[in-house]
Amino acid sequence: MIANQEELTKLRFNEAGLIPAVVQSAESKRVLMVAWMNLESIHKTFELGESVFFSRSRGEIWHKGATSGNTQRVLKVEVDCDRDCLLIQVEEGGPACHNGTESCFDTSVLGEAGTTNG
Amino acid sequence: MIANQEELTKLRFNEAGLIPAVVQSAESKRVLMVAWMNLESIHKTFELGESVFFSRSRGEIWHKGATSGNTQRVLKVEVDCDRDCLLIQVEEGGPACHNGTESCFDTSVLGEAGTTNG
């Protein structure tokens, strides 16, 4: 899988050299997780055809699923109009969340329409 | 629309007091945009039942669609397992992107599966 080099040079990383990546299941359309990438992890993602992030807590490259086996096969990487965010369409190899749920957003709800104060 | 107060106090904002919010169309399931919220914009989102962000470039609260008319009615706000990212399901009032496209990710593609170096 190869990256469009012109698009790659136009990406806007933050002051820490990172760009947020939203990961979406191409099949269920569920948003699975949001993680960060640096240039090296983007290169590795294209090299492997699987999601590779940069772990801010561990300060290192993180090949998603290398330990759990739940890798994500990358089908498409889109860039937003500000060029400071990525949207990655993946084929899920298993639950994205370490809690075992499909999505990291399956944990809790801050609120829903239809709830009122009175 | 009311926020779950316990979930609200557990949110983890970054050093600038912001949390990223992924906005998804509840109907088309397209990821529309990623923007940032502070506590005030979250309160306003729940008060109005419409997306309200914090504009980092302008340094102010930004009621999405206040100028363009393309507001986003909020149906559900989910929190990820790390409590440092939000996923907002919305009913679209019009194109999310200032370029006139449904999604801010409709602009450019960094790469797709099936492309190889030969």
Image (cartoon, coloured by chain):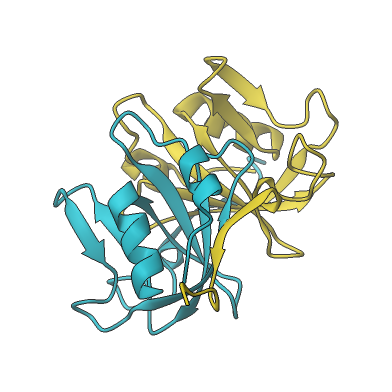
Chain colours: A cyan, B yellow
* Left or right of B4 in this view: B109: right
Indicate the position of residue B109 as horizontal and vertical percent values. Answer: 61, 56
Instruction: Tell which residue pokes out farthest to the top in this image.
Output: B59
Indicate the position of residue A14 as horizontal and vertical percent values. Answer: 37, 32
Can you see residue A114? no
Identify whether B40 is placed above or below B34. Answer: above
Image quarter where the N terminus of chain B lies is top right
* Left or right of B42 in this view: A35: left
The foreground one among B34 and B38 is: B34
* Left or right of B44 in this view: B65: right
Kindly identify the residue that appears in the image at 32 percent across and 78 percent down.
A100
Kindly identify the residue that appears in the image at 53 percent across and 34 percent down.
B42
Can you see residue B67? yes
Indicate the position of residue B50 as horizontal and vertical percent values. Answer: 70, 38
**So how many labels did they put on this image?**
0
Residue B54, image quadrant? top right
Indicate the position of residue B26 as horizontal and vertical percent values. Answer: 71, 61
Kindly identify the residue that appears in the image at 59 percent across and 20 percent down.
B61
Identify whether B114 is placed above or below B87. Answer: below
The foreground one among A40 and A109 is: A40
